[in-house]
Amino acid sequence: MDGKVWVCFVLFSIAGAKKNDREVILDINKLTAYVGETGLQIRCHVEGKTVVSPTWMIMEFAGFQSKSPMLYLFRKDQKDVIEWGEEFNVTQLQDHINVTGHLEGTKSFLQLDFNKVACGDGGRYTCSYGGLDKHGRLRKYSMSGDFIAQTIDGGPPKLTIDTKVVKIYDSLKVSPGEKIHLVCEGDVGKPRIPIFWLLDEVPKPQRLLGEKDGVRQGLQIIPDDNLCSFKSESHLYFEMKKSLMVVTCKIAFRTASIFLHP
């Protein structure tokens, strides 16, 4: 669970059930958040009264590369014990998540407080709660919620023209009628942020280019080892006009422009 500071949003799955119909509730206090943001809280707590003798509470996490019990809360020697799942990097988690919990009837809870959101925190959280009812029968209840971390603005766009890398604000001489192929590539975050092409055709005002202008979306690369760094590219095919043109590639708040003159 690592990340850079970029965008995040959350979807909450309750499947239409009312809180008072449930024995256990999973609350996620933010529907949107940014990687690096503080104040995210994920809390599992008891709502019903069926379980009179609680024995355990588990927080499961299904993320981009893992699906495993994340936290265990149980009683041992009349004390509450909280343990992390074996598949997780405990040191990394404890660096940005504070965990508290208690097993005591309707007061039972398991809570995660994030001092900063990491990109890898995105995924589905499932709270499960179990114990004995008044008849001594084992009962188990669960509820899930989805938290999806987003990122934005991972780096400046890189421009190439006819396979040659060009510097930002380069001024290039192009003959009128010559066909040009530009490629813009960059780190587009998670999920993928669109790459836009803008054209200033002096003296006309700037306009957004689309497919009819020769824009084609290219390859998207999603590396396995970096959940926050999705790379993408966009192509622009057009014919040089007889006036000065400024072509700009835009990814989120970053731009890269070049000047083309006849």
Image (spheres, rainbow, N blue to C red):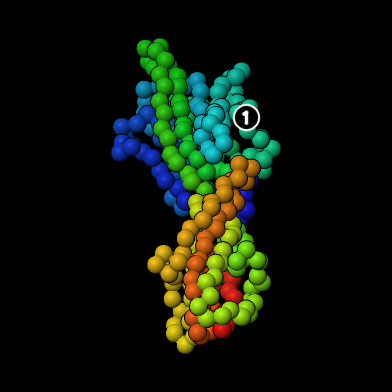
Query: Hey, what amino acid is under mark 1?
Result: Glu
Q: In this view, does 69 lie above or below 133?
A: below
Image quadrant where one finds the C terminus = bottom right
For label 1, the crowd category at 10 Å Cα-Cα, with few meaning under 14, some 14 to 19 and many 20 or more, is few
From the top left corner, tell me how far across and down residue 105 is, in percent. Answer: 45, 25
Residue at image point 49% right, 71% down: 238
**Between 193 and 165, which is closer to the camera in this rendering?**
165
Residue at image point 63% right, 39% down: 93
Element on which disc 1 rests: loop
**Between 99 and 70, which is closer to the camera in this rendering?**
70
Residue at image point 46% right, 64% down: 215
- Is residue 154 among what the camera can see? yes
**Between 60 and 249, which is closer to the camera in this rendering?**
249
From the top left corner, tell me how far across and down residue 132 is, in percent. Answer: 43, 16
> Which quadrant holds residue 175?
bottom right
In the displayed image of the protein, which residue is found farthest to the top?
Answer: 136
From the top left corner, tell me how far across and down residue 57 is, in percent. Answer: 50, 27
Residue at image point 44% right, 85% down: 204
In the displayed image of the protein, which residue is found farthest to the bottom?
Answer: 203
Image quadrant where one finds the N terminus = top right
From the top left corner, tell me how far across and down residue 201 is, in percent. Answer: 48, 82
Q: Is residue 250 above or below residue 98?
A: below
Residue corresponding to mark 1: 87
